[in-house]
Image (spheres, rainbow, N blue to C red):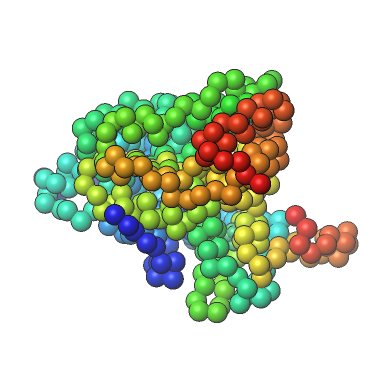
């Protein structure tokens, strides 16, 4: 199925984002705003403990204009499953049910309820907005932290294991739709959300959403680094729809060094490690960048 | 059953916009210099939904803009200027510096 997004025809209404209490330049908030432009007001969202839950509001103020449920860490997809069941019992059919977790809320602490909902093929979709750290509690290592990145608990040489491949894991659930996006490519991201929302059954979308604080870059570079990750070939934009894998964007393959070294979190990465990463990229794309 | 549920205070949708502290965080603010050059995608890159584009007119809501600078990096026609013009006068902070 081909979905095209016309940037001129997006709704002007801001269903999420205005007055949010996140840091300036927040990648998660950018992902949320882009997603809400296509999901629309007939959407119910559940978010486990994370920055995205926190920045949604406090006390009697919220930036959301749709129902937003701040769940416990472990269970956003389970709560979303319950919401879908309640909607079905009432015969309501036109609502998107979304669970939206951070990398920890999806790949680590929230994983059991995610894998459960995927296995039951619940009619909802889960979004992992990935800033590659536990940012809301100060930047600890997650299973999505890349090799060699410094975090507040890997302070000497950085993390010495690889990033767990969540997309492969979700693909292995044999669900209908799995996609990988980046906030620097809004048309592609929004097309993926539109697709997930128009499908029946469980879908999974993984979005790269940099955190300038955690990554050690200036706040105005959030989008730029979400782009460099893709252009260097380290973050592949692709989707797997009913078992068919498509790469949605052919990157320019800039040297991975240009993505890695300006970030303070990679200040301990060695020349050899950079070379190894470059080799992996070259093999994956079967070509070498200029 | 539903009728018996107690009425509890809940958040008013979208109400954070009224209590936004963004303006007090800002060190630099975006200024639109040439609206015809502004990349329409910046509306989707602003984390705070502060930018709106209507035909040729680009509006930035300085009540909710936190001054992150993303719009100025992602688009021509927008520059960041120091929020405290007094300081810029005294210490000579150059326009567009970050
Ligand atoms: C069961 C449980 N363990 C730990 C916490 C504390 N906690 C709150 S948010 C958070 C980190 C969230 O990280 P992630 O899901 O990656 O989202 P991010 O904040 O990075 O956006 C942690 C550890 C919690 N709320 N509940
Ligand atoms: S400086 Fe940041 S918050 Fe302000 S309008 Fe630009 S992108 Fe939005």
Location of ligand 2 given as a quarter of the image: bottom right
Q: Is residue A216 visible?
A: no
- Quarter of the rendering containing residue A141: top right
**Residue at 64% across, 23% down:** A158
Residue nearer the viewer, A28 or A1: A1
Q: Position of residue A92 (x, y in %)?
A: 15, 53
Quarter occupied by the N terminus of chain B: top left
Q: Position of residue A78 (x, y in %)?
A: 27, 34
**Residue at 56% across, 72% down:** B59
Name the side, left or right, on which B87 lies relative to A104: right
Q: Residue furthest front?
A: A287
Quarter occupied by the C terminus of chain B: bottom right
Total tally of numbered discs in the picture = 0
Residue nearer the viewer, A136 or B58: B58
Q: Is residue A207 visible?
A: yes
Name the side, left or right, on which A1 lies relative to A103: left
Name the side, left or right, on which A198 lies relative to A106: left
Name the side, left or right, on which B20 lies relative to A207: right
Please determine whether, in this image, residue A24 is positioned above or below residue A14: above
Q: Position of residue A108 (x, y in %)?
A: 42, 26
Residue nearer the viewer, A239 or A286: A286
Residue nearer the viewer, A32 or A86: A32
Please determine whether, in this image, residue A214 is positioned above or below residue A14: above
**Residue at 52% across, 44% down:** A209
């Amino acid at each position: 199925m081909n979905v095209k997004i016309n940037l001129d025809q997006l709704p002007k209404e801001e269903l999420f984002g205005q007055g949010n209490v996140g840091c300036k330049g927040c990648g998660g908030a950018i992902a949320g705003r882009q997603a809400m432009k296509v999901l629309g007001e007939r959407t119910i969202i559940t978010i486990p403990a994370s920055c995205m839950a926190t920045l949604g509001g406090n006390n009697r103020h919220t930036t959301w204009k749709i129902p937003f449920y701040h769940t416990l860490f472990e269970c956003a997809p389970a709560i979303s499953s319950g919401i879908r069941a309640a909607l079905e019992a009432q015969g309501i059919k036109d609502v998107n049910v979304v669970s939206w977790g951070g990398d920890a809320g999806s790949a680590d602490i929230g994983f059991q309820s995610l894998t459960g909902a995927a296995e039951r093929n619940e009619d909802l979709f889960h979004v992992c907005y990935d800033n590659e750290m536990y940012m809301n509690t100060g930047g600890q290592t997650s299973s999505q932290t890349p090799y060699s990145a410094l975090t507040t608990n890997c302070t000497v040489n950085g993390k010495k294991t690889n990033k767990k491949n969540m997309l492969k894991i979700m693909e292995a659930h044999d669900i209908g739709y799995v996609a990988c996006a980046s906030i620097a490519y809004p048309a592609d991201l929004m097309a993926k959300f539109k697709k997930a929302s128009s499908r029946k059954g469980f879908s999974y979308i993984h979005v790269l959403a940099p955190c300038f604080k955690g990554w050690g870059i200036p706040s105005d570079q959030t989008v730029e680094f979400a782009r460099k990750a893709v252009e260097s070939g380290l973050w592949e934009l692709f989707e797997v729809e009913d078992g068919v894998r498509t790469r949605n964007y052919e990157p320019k393959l800039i040297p991975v060094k240009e993505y890695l070294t300006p970030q303070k979190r990679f200040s301990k990465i060695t020349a050899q490690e950079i070379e190894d990463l470059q080799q992996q990229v070259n093999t994956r794309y079967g070509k070498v960048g200029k | 059953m539903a009728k018996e549920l107690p009425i509890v205070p809940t958040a008013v949708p979208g109400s954070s916009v009224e209590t936004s502290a963004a303006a007090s965080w800002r060190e630099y603010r975006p200024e639109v210099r040439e609206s015809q050059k502004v990349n329409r995608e910046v509306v989707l890159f602003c984390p705070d939904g502060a930018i709106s584009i209507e035909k040729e007119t680009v509006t930035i809501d300085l009540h909710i803009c936190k001054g992150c600078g993303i719009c100025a990096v992602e688009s021509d026609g927008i520059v960041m200027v120091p929020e405290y013009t007094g300081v810029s006068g005294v210490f000579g902070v150059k326009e567009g510096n970050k």
